[in-house]
Image (tube, rainbow, N blue to C red):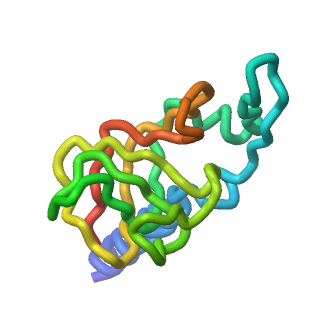
Amino acid sequence: MYRGSALIAAVGLLALQAFADDRAAVVPWEALGKVTLVKNNDGYLPQFSKELIAMDKAQVKLKGFMMPLEPAATQKRFLLTAVPPECGFCLPGGPDQLVEVHAKQGVMYVLDPITVSGKLVLVRDDAGGLLYRLTDAVAILK
């Protein structure tokens, strides 16, 4: 009987640890805010913190609000924002609070926050001013 109880306790501990690891894996928006703009000959270039440089091209999770770029029920390319958009034509934050998401498959548009996982790319030369892109992204269902 002791072995069965120990096994159940070990499985429960592993499940709790996986849940804690899953929660810890979501990159906070404050971390994406650790970027400054530096004057260059042709304008300004982003200067990312060491923490952000370490995440470049790494698999990460982000939680935010979907801002669709096309009038469709599912989106393969959309913006993920730190705060919910109040207007369909207004950006809800600065460039450090927006991530361009390229999903593997269409993601159903929802008003509630979503979590997506993908490869984070630091964008250094986007003409539109975007600083972050998440490629090969998938929505994480609860």
Q: Is 6 displayed left or right of 110 in the figure? A: right
Residue 31: % across, % down: 68, 53
**Which residue occupies 47% across, 57% down?**
62
In the figure, 112 relative to 52: above or below? below
Q: Is 98 displayed left or right of 135 in the figure? A: right
In the figure, 126 relative to 105: above or below? above
In the figure, 74 relative to 105: above or below? below
**Which residue occupies 76% across, 38% down?**
49
Residue 52: % across, % down: 67, 40
Residue projecting furthest to the front: 89
- Work out whether residue 15 can be spotted: no
Instruction: Name which quarter of the figure residue 122 lies in.
Output: top right
**Which residue occupies 27% across, 73% down?**
110
Q: Is 131 displayed left or right of 100 in the figure? A: right
Residue 23: % across, % down: 49, 66
Could you tell me which quadrant the N terminus lies in?
bottom left
Q: Nearer the viewer, residue 111 or 140?
A: 111
Instruction: Name which quarter of the figure residue 136 lies in.
Output: top left
Q: Nearer the viewer, residue 76 or 50?
A: 76
